[in-house]
Image: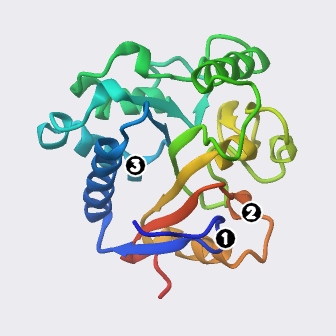
Amino acid sequence: MTKMDHNAQTGRVFTLPDANAQATYLADWILEQALAKKDGFLSIALSGGSTPQKLYELLGSPAYARKMPWSRIHLFFGDERMVPPTHEASNHHMVNKALLSHIDIPFRNVHPMPTFADADDAAKIYQRELEIFYGNNQLDAAKPLFDIVFLGLGNDGHTASLFPKTPVLQEKTKWVSWCDPTTVPYRRLTLTYPTLASSRHVVFVVSGEGKKDILKAVRSGENDYPAAAISTTGELSWVIDKAASSE
């Protein structure tokens, strides 16, 4: 990926034939980023959903798993439903099934969101884990927390678990918070806007004709969809399939 702009409206769009092509493109790019990172760990915030699942399955395949320097990669989560980690609705469960169970990554390098506590406590626990990894409790624009943040796009314009008309959208200081959306099941933990912005690369991964209209709306910026407010101190891109493209 080449130099891109910094928010959901100005980020460059990469259009690929289908979801399989998206997965291959991103797997190759992640491998390139991982091998190029010589100073410290490569930190990645993962997203849930069926589209990134294809990417995780590919990264867990022998062709990629044996090339990736897993000992130098830390995996975090952008959001999580407040369900047990073995629950079918759990993002961690999906990532474990698609990727983690197939790779040799140190246990300490995987950072699932806690769902055993109440939401406030769970958010504080995960924020502390991020602070320890980062080495500070204040984010510095010159030192991104994440190398890569993957995001999806819901039909209602949500991303991570930043849902329309939820108080978490106004959070300016906490790194991790929670929401209780009325339109979908389960209370959810989520990284906040400031935390997602502390990244070298934010990558939206969107596929399917059903996402065409909402993608166009978010890209226009003429609305209050949560995804439209995503920005980053680094670079932002959209990796979409042809079906989701309005061009």
| Nearer to us in this view, 114 or 30 | 30
Q: Is residue 89 visible?
A: no
Identify the mark nearer the N-term, 3 or 1.
3
Q: Residues within 10 Å of mark 2 (few under 14, many from 20)?
A: many
* Amino acid type indicated by mark 3: Pro
C-alpha gap between disc 2 and disc 3: 21 Å
Residue beneath disc 2: 225
Q: Residue furthest front?
A: 39
What amino acid is found at the position of numbered circle 1 in the picture? Val
Q: Nearer the viewer, residue 201 or 123?
A: 201
Give the colour scheme of this rendering.
rainbow
Q: Look at mark 1 in the image and give the residue it sits on.
A: 218
Q: Is residue 205 above or below residue 41?
A: below
Q: Earlier in the sequence, mark 2 or mark 1?
A: 1
Image quadrant in which you'd find residue 41: top left
Q: Residue at x 73, y 74 (%)?
A: 221
Mark 3 or mark 2, which is nearer the start of the sequence?
3
Q: Name the image quarter holding residue 38.
A: top left
For mark 1, does the 10 Å Cα neighbourhood hold few (<14), some (14 to 19), or many (20 or more) residues? many
Residue under label 3: 52
Q: Residue furthest bottom?
A: 247
Instruction: Give residue 28's position: percent from left, percent from top.
Output: 26, 54
Provide the secondary structure element on which disc 2 rests. loop
Left or right of 34, for residue 92? right
Name the residue rendered at 30%, 33% in the picture. Answer: 99
Q: Is residue 153 left or right of residue 48?
A: right
Q: Are marks 2 and 1 in contact (CB under 8 Å)?
A: yes
As measured in the structure, the alpha-carbon distance from the residue carrying label 3 to the one carrying label 1 is 20 Å
* Residue at x 73%, y 49% (from the top left corner): 163
